[in-house]
Amino acid sequence: MNFTKKEYWDNIYSSEKQEMDWYSTFSKIYPKIKHCFIDKSMKILQIGCGTSNFAKKLYQKGFSEITNIDISETAIEKMKKKYQNLSIKFEIMDTRNLTFKDESFDCIIDKGTLDSLLTEYPKENSLKMLSEIYRIMKPNSIFIEITWGTPFDRMFYLKNKKFKWKISHKIISCEKEEEKFTFYIYFLRKGKENEETKKG
Ligand SMILES: C[S@@+](CC[C@H](N)C(=O)[O-])C[C@H]1O[C@@H](n2cnc3c(N)ncnc32)[C@H](O)[C@@H]1O
């Protein structure tokens, strides 16, 4: 399957009526990542927001500087309409070519977009995505990557001499529709060189 195409996602989001969240919901994930959300004025970017209610939930917790991007015009138009009364930003944008200035965000979060981009030309696509994210991160800011990918699969892409970030992760096991499911949360803190990258 190829999940890198805009048309694929437009089609998914046109047939969907409700909000949907891939992998898991805000209420299950937030307790595992809340230590990253320290300051209510921090600038937050969600990559590949789809029709997830993540941004709304963060906004309800008092975070007011939230921007969301997605390659799918259908998803972004739905979200803009749905949240027109809230000051949350939604923009159509490709994560491989972000139009934000260098060092603009304090916290960047992705759930599922890296996984989608790894389904075609994984090395090229992940390098473009991660380079763009790294570029727009402020020094000492954090990138939270939520993925089904194990450390064995993902460290190959995340650990790169180009990126001076310190990586840690959490393993989350949960049940969805009576099936056991495991996903991973990677925390990439910019500005502190990864010990293993340092060793070369
Ligand atoms: C697995 S879904 C996850 C959606 C949402 N984050 C969630 O957890 O429900 C992947 C999302 O990435 C978006 N996407 C795929 N390729 C993209 C790209 N190059 N740039 C930005 N968004 C992209 C898709 O449109 C889709 O909304």
Image (cartoon, rainbow, N blue to C red):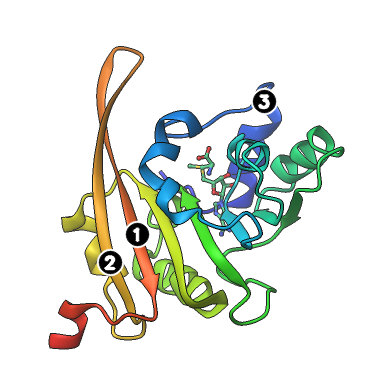
Q: Is residue 175 above or below residue 114?
A: above
Instruction: Please state which of residues 123 and 186 is positioned toward the viewer in this rendering.
Output: 186
Task: Give coordinates of residue 30: x percent, y percent.
Answer: 45, 39
Q: Amino acid at mark 2?
A: Ile
Tell me how far mark 3 sits from mark 2, CA to CA: 37 Å
Name the residue furthest left: 199
Which residue is disc 1 drawn over?
187
Exactly how many numbered labels are in the figure? 3
Q: For numbered disc 1, what is the local secondary structure?
A: strand
Tell me how far mark 2 sits from mark 1, CA to CA: 6 Å
Task: Give coordinates of residue 66: x percent, y percent.
Answer: 68, 54
Which residue is disc 2 drawn over?
167
Q: Earlier in the sequence, mark 3 or mark 2?
A: 3
Q: Amino acid at mark 1?
A: Phe
Which residue is disc 3 drawn over?
15
The reply to whether residue 121 is visible in this rendering is yes
The residue shown at (19%, 86%) is: 198
Q: For numbered disc 2, what is the local secondary structure?
A: strand
